[in-house]
Image (cartoon, helix red, strand yellow):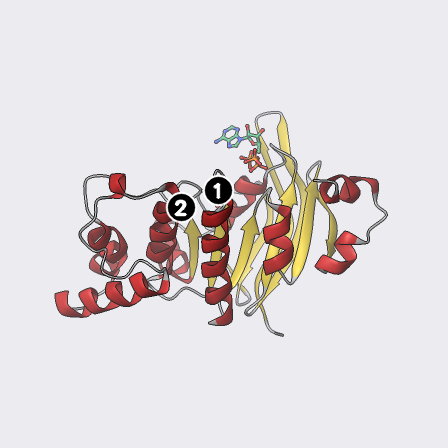
Amino acid sequence: MGEVILELKNIHKSFGTNKIHRGINLSLKKGESLGLLGGSGTGKSVLLRSIIGLERIDQGEILFHGERIDQLSEEELTPYRIKISYSFQSGALFDSINVFENIGYPLFEHTRFSYQQIKDKVAEMLKLIDLPGREHIMPSDLSGGMQKRVGMARAMILNPEVILYDEPTAGLDPANTLNVVGLMQRLKEKGLASIFVTHDIPSALSLCDRIVVLNEGKIIFNDTPTNFQNSDDPIVKKFNAH
Ligand SMILES: Nc1ncnc2c1ncn2[C@@H]1O[C@H](COP(=O)(O)OP(=O)(O)OP(=O)(O)O)[C@@H](O)[C@H]1O
């Protein structure tokens, strides 16, 4: 790990008079997993959404491989949204199409791969998420945990460099949580960098190289999981109590 691939510089964001971010500085290195913690409503999801331009920041800079991306148009952002993939909290599957079409969708949309190539790619992804041969299942016939894994497979299929996970284990039972975290671990081993927004502290500690805590619009902690667990900071300690 060395090269910084994503950099947030002095990010400010408000909704009306509601100041969410008050000068956020953060960088993500190649292959690194960063756990982003913070109380409810501190702006963790807004920060992820800002990175890929689903929210526009008021001030500051977002750089990907040193290039500014915060001022790009929707069209100009498309290639960056392939390199920096956002995995929605719910999985966000299309209900009316099956697992194959859901996972293959970005390939149909953004590539010229043949139908057979897409079939092969999707089959490979289904193996990776431990659901081999489930191409023809409809999303409504999958458990919540399986839906999240299918959503992650779709977020992964265009080989991004960074994946932004928005509470991927929220609402899952312990077995499904382990499955999802296991998948995240495998993706990490393939060299994928990630920002993992979560309230699930044990999963963040097991997966992440670095823990970042957002509080009142600023980053108040940015260090290793070990130092997080040993921190004397009263706000950081509150997270450790959970
Ligand atoms: N589009 C929007 N318009 C107005 N306010 C918004 C919008 N999106 C988010 N907010 C507000 O921004 C704040 C931060 O929201 P965000 O969803 O990022 O919090 P969070 O830290 O992810 O919380 P949680 O852990 O509960 O998911 C909240 O007060 C929310 O109401």
Question: In this view of the protein, which residue sits in the foreground, 206 or 28?
Answer: 206
Whether residue 94 is visible, yes or no, is no
Name the secondary structure under disc 2: helix
Task: Determine whether, in the image, residue 234 is placed left or right of residue 30.
Answer: right
Name the secondary structure under disc 1: loop
Question: In this view of the protein, which residue sits in the foreground, 76 or 6?
Answer: 6
Residue placed furthest toward the front? 175
Does residue 230 lie above or below 93 as drawn? below
State the image coordinates of residue 88 (x, y, percent, origin top left). Answer: 42, 45
Q: Check disc 2 and report the residue beneath it.
A: 145
Q: CA distance from mark 2 to mark 1?
A: 8 Å
**Quarter of the rendering occupied by the C terminus:** top right
Contact between labelled residues 1 and 2, with CB atoms less than 8 Å apart: yes
State the image coordinates of residue 95 (x, y, percent, origin top left). Answer: 24, 39
The residue lying at 64 percent from left, 45 percent from top is 37
Task: Determine whether, in the image, residue 11 is placed left or right of residue 93.
Answer: right
Does residue 155 lie above or below 192 as drawn? above
- In terms of image quarters, where does ligand 1 lie? top right
**Quarter of the rendering occupied by the N terminus:** bottom right
